[in-house]
Amino acid sequence: MYESMTVQVRAGLGELRLTEAVQVLSRGYEVLGDATAAVRRVAVADLPRVAAEVVAGAPERVAGFQAVWLDAGEEGRLVLLARHEVLAVLPWHVLLPELVAAWKAFAEPRIPVQAR
């Protein structure tokens, strides 16, 4: 059985950054297993409807932890789903701040610009 948490996120969250942040958590917490396989971005127009569909469809998936970025352009939601056994080891009040810290720590690769 899954529990879910939905948080509002800024535009341009970045699927690569989110995947890297979840990967960092997976390496730090064995209970998460290979959670990076459960990170995905969904472009949506109707955030509430799609968020409800993601939560309702969670039991069909295998991962112990899932992160689904609902990207609606200027706004978005991050739906986090975790099995009870994951939350017993890594409760929301620990998981969410660590995910945010890992996301902030990952910088998008930048191409150096040379001045002439």
Image (spheres, rainbow, N blue to C red):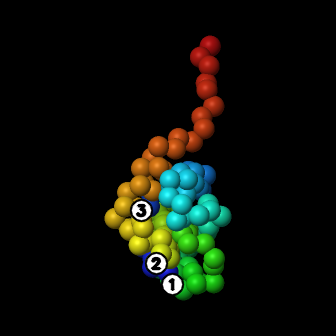
Q: In this view of the protein, which residue sits in the foreground, 73 or 70?
A: 70
Q: Is residue 77 above or below residue 2?
A: above
For the residues labelled 2 and 1, the Cα–Cα distance comes to 6 Å
> Relative to residue 68, is residue 99 depicted above or below?
above
Graded by Cα atoms within 10 Å as few (under 14), some (14 to 19) or many (20 or more), the crowding at tag 3 reads some
State yes or no: discs 2 and 1 in contact (Cβ < 8 Å): yes
* Residue that numbered label 1 is attached to: 1
53 is higher (above) or lower (below) than 114: below
Question: Which residue does the numbered mark 3 point to in the structure image?
Answer: 95
Could you tell me which residue is drawn at 38 percent across and 57 percent down? 97
How busy is the neighbourhood of tag 1: few (under 14 within 10 Å), some, or many (20 plus)? few
Q: Amino acid at mark 1?
A: Met
Instruction: Give the quadrant of the C terminus.
Output: top right
Residue 53 located left or right of residue 105:
right
Q: Residue 104, how many percent across, how many down?
A: 45, 47
- Judged from the image, the secondary structure of the residue bearing numbered disc 3 is helix
Sequence-wise first label, 3 or 1: 1
